[in-house]
Amino acid sequence: MYRWCLFFVLATPLTLALWVPCAYAVPVPGLYVVVVQEKDPQQAAQQAMRQELVRLTGAPDAPADPQLASLIDDARHYVQLQRATTSGSTQIVFDSTALRDAIVAAGRSVWDPDRPLLWIALPQSAADAGDDLRTRLSAAAAARGLPLTFAPAVTPADTANATTLLSAARRAGASAALLAQPLPADATHWQWTLVASNADGRWSGGADSGIDGAVDALVRAAQALERAPLADFDCHIQGVSDLRSFASLLAAVGNTPGIVEVRVVEVDADHLTLHLKARGGAADIQRALGSDRLRAAGTGADGALEYRYSAGL
């Protein structure tokens, strides 16, 4: 057994703090703050509520839902702060707890405020339209309550297939990747490819379409996970040969969608055994955990999920 194995019980909390760059799911800044052009207090609150319902439920049709009509009618009841801005707009800050509770009481689900960070890869050919496209994507993401980050540059290797695309996103601290590819016949539309551990898709359209398609898929995946029962899984991982690999692996597993609890059962040389509590079945967990660093190796004789970890990739 390696020396680090004897030390990991004491060292792990500090090591995780040092080596985990960021979580795959992140809070959305200003999720409960809406700015509208309307100046009338009642109408401004109602207009802001329509936008807020889209953000919180993840559903663009939420403002038209009869179940939520009373929240729009009585929007000011959920306002925590309302003020005029220096530009003449109206800023509305909603009471987060009261509004979430009201949406649930009305029979609708609330998308978790800690949401998948979307990594957007734009091709080199988008250099001329890149700034405008980034601005439009950022605005569309803000309207849907989706956190995003842009890849500074992508190589053909990063976008060769779904696995490498998602791995590149994870190296940037994101949990989902959205690739934009130009359509020769229409410079204003793009081919969008979404890859996440529990969601994927391909469609074409403008910047709004790119974000809307990604959000719709991620929300459906989140709702499916919420409905899935909790189950216990054992996981054997070989190739975890040092503390840095140990910390990095635990961070990746702990941030995987659907996994709600991770417990270290045994560390023996470069072999790590984890006990996972997660939503979904074994196939769902295998797909969610798989990456270019963590490759599935089947199922062991004891029914545990088997993986091989490669720190150098």
Image (spheres, rainbow, N blue to C red):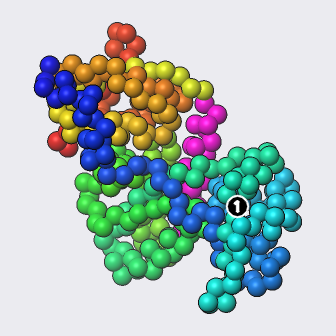
**In the rendered structure, does residue 214 fall within the stretch colored magenta?**
yes
Residue 4 visible from this viewpoint: yes
Quadrant location of residue 230? top right
Instruction: Say which residue label 1 marks.
Output: 95
Please check the rendered image and state whether residue 16 is part of the magenta-colored stretch, yes or no. no
Instruction: Please give left or right for residue 220 compared with residue 39 in the image.
Output: left
Asked whether residue 211 is in view, the answer is: no
- How many numbered tags mark residues here? 1
SS category of the residue bearing label 1: loop
Asked whether 144 or 30 is in front, the reply is 30
Left or right, 32 with respect to 300, comes to right
Of residue 244 and residue 154, the one placed in the foreground of this image is 244
In the image, the segment drawn in magenta is 206-228
Counting from the top left corner in percent of width and height, residue 24 is at 42, 49
Please name the residue shown 81% across and 83% down the image. 40
Query: Farthest residue in the top direction?
Result: 301
Given residues 289 and 38, the one toward you in this image is: 38
Q: Is residue 105 above or below residue 92?
A: above
Residue 41's x, y, as percent? 80, 79
Where residue 249 sits, quadrant-wise, is: top left
Q: Amino acid at mark 1?
A: Asp
What secondary structure predominates along the stretch shown in magenta?
helix
Please name the residue shown 77% across and 63% down the image.
78
Residue depicted at 63% across the width and 69% down the height: 33
Residue 74, image x, y percentages:
85, 64
- Which quadrant holds the N terminus? top left
Residue at screen point 64% across, 34% down: 227
- Expressed as whole percent of the image width and height from the top left, the position of residue 224 reads 61, 38
User: Which quadrant of the view contains residue 6?
Assistant: top left
> Callout 1: 10 Å neighbours few (<14), some, many (20+)?
some
